[in-house]
Image: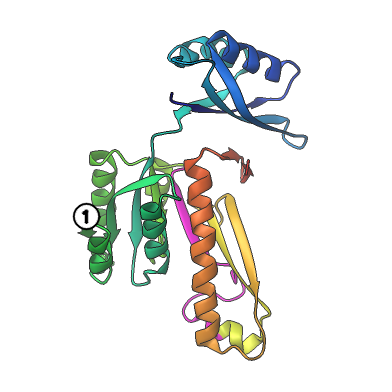
């Protein structure tokens, strides 16, 4: 029996939870998990509900239709997704393979509910890693004169492979504003959390020179504002005076991989809802 996840947001007002629960019961569903949040600052209400068929042999085929009047009445942005269908995810990478390897390993281990129909890179270096996991590899080179063509190829792959999510697993190219607008809320990026202090090349050398005591990573949705999209997850680990630039970079790779994996999993499980420039994450 297939369960579903219902996510929604709307202007906050009395009666929302009652109406949602009523529609689910009327369609033969049973609520197995429910989380909600009302943002006093924006006046928006957010909710995530896991729904299972209400009895042996039951199904939820009528849930979508029965929920439409409720959604219309409360002005909801909503989505209903089957829990047994992995999210089709295209992963983009440049020269560093730590995040790519971590994602592909977690998929093989059954701990990440996504499937990767392709890996895209502007270099050939990660081809062998992708092929080790039996994932098709696409080399799409990028230079100052071919950026438009490269992004057109990316969009072709997104369409042809029915991609729902794009993950920048240390893809070291800035996406154009136009591409970001074509895939809103569908691109996740990971980077170290030294920004904006240590910009550009060799950030861990810069951090070492300043004697940093925390190393962190940030996973966020990509928008036209570079590295300023809604944050999904962050984490830090301690550093000390014994750690040179290479040690700091190794620790940074570990935390980047962990933070990105959590962000991708929460997105795939429909636990992340956009709230303007922020996110609501139902863990």
Q: Residue at x 49, y 61 (%)?
A: 190
Residue 175 position within the rendered picture, expressed as x and y whole percent measured from the top left: 39, 56
Residue 70 sits above or below residue 253 on the image = above
User: In this picture, is 34 found above or below 170?
Assistant: above
The number of numbered badges drawn on the structure is 1
Residue 261 rendering spot, x and y as whole percentages = 49, 56
Q: Position of residue 65 (x, y in %)?
A: 47, 11
In the picture, measured across the screen, residue 249 lies left or right of residue 105, that is right
> Which residue is found at the position 29% from the left and 43% from the top?
158
Answer few, some or many: residues within 10 Å of disc 1's Cα (few below 14, many 20 plus, some between 14 and 19).
some
Question: At 48% from the left edge and 64% from the top edge, which residue is drawn?
Answer: 257
Q: Quadrant of residue 95?
A: bottom left
Task: Name the residue furthest front.
Answer: 56
Who is closer to the viewer here, 155 or 18?
Answer: 18
* Left or right for 265, reference 165: right
Where 243 falls versus 20 (above or below)? Answer: below
Instruction: Give the position of the C terminus as an image quadrant.
Output: top right
Q: Position of residue 114 (x, y in %)?
A: 39, 45
Q: Residue 148 magenta-drawn?
A: no
Q: Secondary structure at mark 1?
A: loop
Q: Which residue is mark 1?
A: 136
Residue 76 lies left or right of residue 99; in this view the side is right
| 30 and 252: which is toward the camera | 30
Q: Quadrant of the N terminus?
A: top left
Colour pattern: rainbow
Residue 5 in view (yes/no) = yes
Q: Is residue 226 visible?
A: no
- The residue at 52%/15% (across/down) is 55
Q: Is residue 200 magenta?
A: yes
Q: Which stretch is magenta?
A: 185-205
């Amino acid at each position: 029996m297939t369960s579903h996840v219902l996510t929604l947001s709307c202007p906050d007002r009395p009666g929302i939870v009652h109406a949602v629960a009523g529609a689910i019961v009327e369609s033969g569903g049973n609520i197995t998990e429910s989380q909600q949040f009302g943002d006093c600052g924006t006046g928006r209400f957010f909710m995530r509900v896991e729904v299972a068929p209400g009895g042996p042999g039951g199904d939820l085929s009528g849930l979508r239709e029965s929920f439409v009047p409720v959604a219309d009445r409360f002005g909801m942005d909503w989505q209903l997704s089957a829990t047994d269908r992995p999210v089709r995810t295209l992963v983009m990478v440049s020269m560093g393979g730590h995040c790519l390897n971590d994602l592909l390993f977690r998929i093989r281990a059954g701990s990440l509910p996504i499937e990767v129909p392709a890996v895209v890179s502007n270099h050939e270096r990660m081809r062998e890693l992708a092929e080790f996991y039996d994932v098709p590899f696409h080399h799409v080179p990028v230079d100052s004169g071919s950026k438009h063509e490269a992004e057109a190829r990316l969009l072709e792959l997104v369409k042809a492979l029915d991609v729902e999510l794009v993950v920048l697993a240390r893809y070291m190219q800035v996406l154009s504003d136009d591409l970001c607008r074509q895939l809103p809320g569908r691109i996740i990026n990971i980077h170290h959390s030294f920004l904006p202090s240590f910009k550009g090349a060799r950030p861990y050398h810069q951090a070492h020179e300043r004697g940093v005591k925390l190393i962190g990573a940030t996973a966020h949705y990509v928008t036209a504002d570079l590295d300023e999209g809604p944050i999904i997850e962050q984490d830090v680990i301690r550093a000390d005076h014994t750690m040179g630039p290479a040690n700091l970079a190794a620790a940074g790779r570990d935390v980047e991989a962990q933070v990105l994996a959590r962000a991708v999993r929460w997105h795939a499980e429909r636990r992340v809802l956009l709230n303007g420039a922020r996110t609501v994450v139902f863990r």
